[in-house]
Amino acid sequence: MSAGEADHPAARLDDVVHQRVRLGILTVLDEARRADFAYLRDELGLTDGNLSRHLRVLDQAGYVAIEKAFEGNRPRTWVSATRQGKAALAAEVGALRELLDGLDGRRSPS
Amino acid sequence: MSAGEADHPAARLDDVVHQRVRLGILTVLDEARRADFAYLRDELGLTDGNLSRHLRVLDQAGYVAIEKAFEGNRPRTWVSATRQGKAALAAEVGALRELLDGLDGRRSPS
């Protein structure tokens, strides 16, 4: 970190990953490797439109891969995290952990 | 939590507190009790305009109290977290911790 930059961990959070819906999507994908559209939507309590919008942001950042497939004649949309997406989640988790540790250090246990 | 609701911790994050600048502000205020405008701005690496905008959102939610005062003839703006603001930060921290714990549980140490 260069001198003169803010060194608060919140200054290192990246909106692309930090935004709560997108953080939820990447977290589910970290747990599930890949997930279909309906699973993500239900797991995170989203509408179709809201999930689509945030998947588009993650896709444009190169953080997810989206694959459309047919099972029988039922279309399914599969989503998985890319290597870059995993790295971005790891950076977010590191900053969040530092932020939470800072709060803990100040707080008495009672 | 009622049946039918999404139970993923990301679904419990509140944008008012989760947004990265506002999370930073509430975190600094948790550490500092109160902080002046310039300190918050520099600590979080923000512009005046950006900090003002996010303080307005937090103020409208009842999460911060803003007090303008003169020291000699130098105006200062003091910001502190309200009881509601502290409760909102605590809820955010709880949801984040659950989210991070879920990730840890899935990850092998190597």
Image (cartoon, coloured by chain):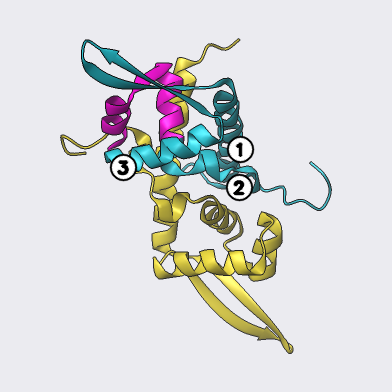
Chain colours: A cyan, B yellow
The answer to whether residue B92 of the structure is visible from this angle is yes
| Residue A39 within the segment the image draws in magenta | yes
The answer to whether residue B64 of the structure is visible from this angle is no
Do discs 1 and 2 share a chain? yes
What residue range appears in magenta? Answer: A23-45
**Kind of residue sitting beneath label 1:** Ala
Where does the image place residue B78, in percent across and percent down from the top left? 60, 73
Spatial separation of the CA atoms under disc 1 and disc 2:
7 Å
Q: Which residue is mark 1?
A: A95
For the C terminus of chain A, which image quadrant? top left
Figure check: B26 above or below A7: below
Dot 3: within a 10 Å radius of its alpha carbon, few (fewer than 14), some, or many (20 or more) residues?
Answer: few
Dot 2: within a 10 Å radius of its alpha carbon, few (fewer than 14), some, or many (20 or more) residues?
Answer: many
Dot 1: within a 10 Å radius of its alpha carbon, few (fewer than 14), some, or many (20 or more) residues?
Answer: some
User: In the image, which is nearer the foreground, mark 1 or mark 3?
Assistant: 3
User: On the rendered structure, is A20 left or right of A94?
Assistant: left
1 or 2: tag closer to the N-terminus: 2
Spatial separation of the CA atoms under disc 1 and disc 3:
29 Å
- For disc 3, the chain is A
Instruction: Look at the numbered discs 1 and 2 and tell me whether their residues touch, using CB distance below 8 Å.
Output: yes
Where does the image place residue B95, in percent across and percent down from the top left? 40, 39
Q: Which residue is mark 2?
A: A10
**SS of the residue at dot 1?**
helix
Q: Which mark is residue A49?
A: 3
Where does the image place residue B52, in percent across and percent down from the top left? 57, 69
Where does the image place residue A108, in percent across and percent down from the top left? 52, 45
User: In the image, which is nearer the foreground, mark 2 or mark 3?
Assistant: 3
- For disc 1, the chain is A
**In front of the other: A27 or B89:** A27
User: On the rendered structure, is B56 left or right of B78?
Assistant: left
Q: Main secondary structure of the magenta part?
A: helix
Q: Quadrant of residue B70?
A: bottom right
